[in-house]
Amino acid sequence: MPSLPPPILVTTPDELGQLAVELARHPRLGIDTESNSLHAFRERVCLVQIATPEADYLVDSLAIQDLSPLAPVMADTNIEKIFHAAEYDLLTLKRDHGFTFANLFDTMLAARILARPKIGLGDLLAEEFNVEQSKKHQRADWGKRPLDPAMLEYAQLDIHYLIPLSDQLKSQLMHAGRWPIAEEDFRRAANVNGVGPGTPELNIWRINGVRDLSPQQCAILQKLAEYRYQRAERADLPLFKIIGDKTLCAIAQSEPANARELRRVAGMTEVNVRRHGKALLQAVKDGLQSAPLYPPRRPAYDEPYHERLDALKEWRKTRARELQVESDIILPRDVMEDIARRDPATLTDLSPAMYTIPWRHSQYAGDILAALAALRTEQT
């Protein structure tokens, strides 16, 4: 790891207020976050790293509960915020602090649009600056205090080169004629939304293997998931640190009636039997006495829609091969699905589906309409 100037740690509201004033005078910032998703029931942003051309700041968002002084900076259209793989950072900052974002640059998205074979931050830093980034602290517990100095160095390196890296990538995008695509994707990234309503941790239909269970075993799995959720919340631990999905599904499938049978379930350790055995067996019993659960009904198969979608996928794939990029760089999946639903026959019909990507509309609208028209001809 290279030797960098020491980062400035921000741990009080007064220091944060001063930092907000300082950041407002810079037209470009590098930003990253560290969360404790692998170590807590409800993850939180634990550290916000912000780089200016002059200094690197590490904001302790556990010590400072209110980060609202940073909100105007994040929303300022005149200040470019540079992230690597922005989506997760944006989602967590929106969730925990209510930020809105404008004027983004995502170095990972830029690398994808450039068809770089390696798009990780460490790979890009190595290629552009001959800097080696350690992965030692990727899974660290950022909720622990005090933070280890080595972790602070790791967090600093995540932002220190973002501004010069974006300079390099923007130059390459401009040279390749792909800057308009990047601009559209950066704008779309700023509007990313979080999870919908409900409690996803209790949604058993997301668990691998649930479709192999009988309806009664699904009812058991639901009771097991409810126990795990409650236990994880009390212990402030992620679900997998209580009992993994695979083991939970195996318990539901085997329907153990006693501790001896529970011990035979794949993934059940003696520690888990001692710690959770009684509650798990009660959950199995409750599930057996509950009404059977059936998977949510899937929408009726819409054959014309899927035929249009396949035609668009084939066109997109062909165009992507020409540019040697992944298909979604040509046409984002959500836009492609919207087009297939609308079945446009004219530019006026197509425009509403592509309003977030006007440059692609100007470049590809004719091709898209031609692909759909060819399908109609083939069908008739």
Image: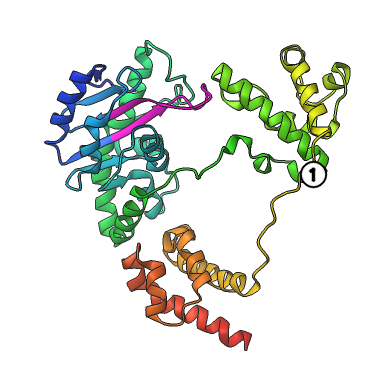
| Front residue of this view, candidates 26 and 229 | 229
Task: Say which quadrant the C terminus sits in.
Answer: bottom right
Q: Image check: 201 left or right of 74?
A: right
Residue wearing tag 1:
212
Task: Say which quadrant the N terminus sits in.
Answer: top left
| Rendered location of residue 118, percent (x, y) | 44, 44
Residue at 26% x, 58% y: name it.
175
| Rendered location of residue 199, percent (x, y) | 57, 37
Image: 88 above or below 361: above
| Crowd class of label 1 (few under 14; some 14 to 19; many from 20; radius 10 Å) | few
Residue at 60% x, 22% y: name it.
232
User: Which amino acid type is shown beneath numbered disc 1?
Assistant: Asp
| Residue 230 position by quadrant | top right
| Residue 150 position by quadrant | top left
Q: Is residue 223 magenta?
A: no
Of all residues, the one furthest to the left in this rendering is: 25
Residue at 32% x, 17% y: name it.
63
Q: Range of the magenta residues? A: 31-49
| Rendered location of residue 153, percent (x, y) | 33, 20
Q: Is residue 38 magenta?
A: yes
| Front residue of this view, candidates 125 and 37 | 37
Q: How is the image coloured?
A: rainbow
| Residue 72 position by quadrant | top left
| Rendered location of residue 138, percent (x, y) | 46, 26
| Front residue of this view, candidates 373 and 76 | 76
Image: 68 above or below 203: above
Asked whether residue 130 appears in the rendered view, the answer is no
| Front residue of this view, candidates 325 and 232 | 232
Asked whether residue 65 appears in the rendered view, the answer is yes
Image: 70 above or below 292: above
